[in-house]
Amino acid sequence: MKIEGNIVKVKGPKAELTFKVSPEIKVVLTENQILISAEPTTKEVRALWGLTRAILQNMVSGVTVGFQKKLEIEGVGFKANVEGKDLMLDVGFSHRVKINGPAGITFAVEKSVIIVSGADKGLVGEVAATIRRVKPPEPYKGKGIRYMGEHIRRKLGKKAVATAG
């Protein structure tokens, strides 16, 4: 880890990440610890202090272990595969949808599960949200792309509503 002015660089086995720290926040590297302090103690600066601490923690975790998000595809004929660095989705449209893999992001597909992994937690979440946005789960049959473990609130439909009233 290096600190040059207000730019923090973290390098590890997975990647190298940089972050520009706000001028109100001071970051000091001691032996095995990162000390983060805030000069004026206003509400906004305290919020920046916590944000900076969380981002630096995620950077250290990302370059050592990495982050991943899992999405599951549900629907007849819905499938995904990896072509090079890109993800190709067949999710009921007349064409295949291509998701470009940004630098630092890798895709993997196991049956109906898409795994998005990388060192930058924010970028992994953003790419996973982009994939989910292609075909979000619909509330009647639950078909679409959802996060692993996400619960979709289901609606009854026309037939059940007609008999209930």
Image (tube, rainbow, N blue to C red):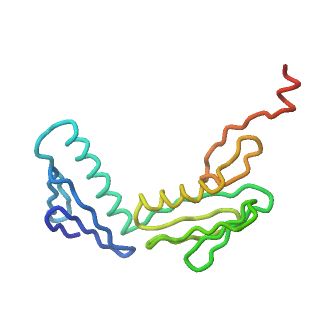
In this view, 15 is above or below 70: below
Q: List x then y, in percent, for residue 114.
A: 62, 64
| Residue found at the far top of this picture | 165
Quarter of the image where the C terminus is located: top right
In this view, 107 is above or below 122: below
Which one is nearer the viewer's eye here, 21 or 98? 98
103 to the left or right of 129 = left
75 to the left or right of 89 = right
Q: List x then y, in percent, for residue 7.
A: 20, 64
Q: Quadrant of residue 35?
A: bottom left
Q: Residue at x 39, y 74 (%)?
A: 14
Quarter of the image where the N terminus is located: bottom left
Q: Residue at x 17, y 61 (%)?
A: 6
| Residue found at the far left of this picture | 39
Q: Residue at x 22, y 65 (%)?
A: 8
Q: List x then y, in percent, for residue 148.
A: 61, 53
Tell how many labels: 0
50 to the left or right of 157 = left
Q: Residue at x 37, y 69 (%)?
A: 64
Q: List x then y, in percent, for residue 11.
A: 30, 73
| Residue found at the far front of this picture | 94
22 to the left or right of 151 = left
Which one is nearer the viewer's eye here, 33 or 2? 2
Q: Quadrant of residue 140?
A: top right
